[in-house]
Image (cartoon, rainbow, N blue to C red):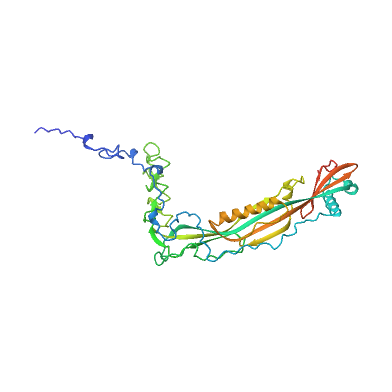
Amino acid sequence: MASIHVPPYAPPAAMFNTVSGYAGTVAGGGSKKHQWQPPLAASIHIPLYAPTAAMFNIVPGYEGTAGGGGAYIPPPPPSVPMPVPEQAPSPPDWHIPSISEDRARQAFATYVSSKCCYSSAPVREGVITNMESFNTYSYRLETFMEPRSTEWSQEPYTGQPVDAGVQPAPGPWQIAAQPPAFFQEHKQTIKVPYTSSVKNCHLCLGKGRNPCTTCAGAGNRVCTLCNGSGYRQSDESCVNCNGRGHKNCSSCSGSGSCQCDTCRGKGKLIVFINLNVKWSIEKDEFVAQDSSGLRVEKLEEVSGKELFKDAQNMVYPVRGFPDVSVAQASERFVRDHQVKNAQTSRILQQRQTIELIPITKVNYMWEGKPYVYYVYGNEFKVKAVDYPDQCCCSVM
């Protein structure tokens, strides 16, 4: 019987559907050099979820509280009338006596002796012809206040007490906080009672794990030595990946996911309202202009004399001060502080201070020519203008 030759038929290409992501796959297996390669980390988008509004309960008295911090809460009107500021019984004595000629000469001598290139002849032989006093006033108003704000906070749930709805939460200004001493800044965060509840973690959707950001959830990464081919040269298998073309991701140990940082793998969060209490100082300062001719930066090197100080719950503007610009600044600052801060904070104390930096302009004659020097501050510092007897010297 004659044999019949039956030719082997390969399945036609039309037999196989085109499947996205599997182009190049053939019957009987594809080439080793065309192994599947894991996706690059940048090719997978991992969405980041912010907490939704539904995550936070509605708490009466805290409707405006938001995650990340809310606006400052206006304080309630005082339950008892605010104390009326005490008016000073009589204006203080604003007269400042001038320094004596002997004190001016002594300060001048000390200044000259500190200069290696200055001769002492003008100090010994100079004749003081006139001394003028200039009062440079500094007015400062400080308001010590307590603003409060609220924000929703969260932390991993590990069995902490949950008290939301047990009873109404106290109002933001009903919660006691221990203030520091007056005019000392401080902060305190207090967890508001009866606001704690448990929610699924918004980032991992309650799973406790998120796709690994290093490998984009693939669990492996393309081998860097063979670029995913599985081979180094010719048909030699890559020793780095054992011919697989990829290696397990070191960040997730090949699992493709990592513990959620937000809930620390718990899958649940306890959410609650935090009350942020801040004790702060609002300060404004005004320096009156003077006509002495001494540069302002020199005055920063010395201290002044305190002429007036008043501290009360609320202060009155200064009255009867000889420099009208200081009185006007006091009235403006007091009004602005009380209007501005009373809307957002509880004013605990106000303090106003007037200081004077004494400046004496000394005119003197030496060898028939006029010269000038200044004595200023509590330290009696001196600034000499064009000192007449200097020599050129240098320190090697």
Q: Quadrant of the C terminus?
A: top right
Compared across the picture, whether 318 is left or right of 376 comes to left
Q: In the rendered image, which quarter is residue 273 located in?
A: bottom left
Q: In the rendered image, which quarter is residue 240 located in?
A: top left
Rendered residue at 56%/56% (across/down)? 341
Residue 374 in view here: yes
**Farthest residue toward the left?**
1
Query: Where residue 236 sits: x, y (%)?
Result: 38, 39
Residue 241 in view here: no
Query: Where residue 312 sits: x, y (%)?
Result: 63, 62
Rendered residue at 38%/55% (across/down)? 54
Rendered residue at 74%/45% (across/down)? 295
Residue toward you, 255 or 280 = 280
Q: In the rendered image, which quarter is residue 11 located in?
A: top left
Query: Where residue 234 sits: x, y (%)?
Result: 38, 36
Residue toward you, 382 or 157 = 382
Residue toward you, 386 or 75 = 75
Q: Quadrant of the N terminus?
A: top left
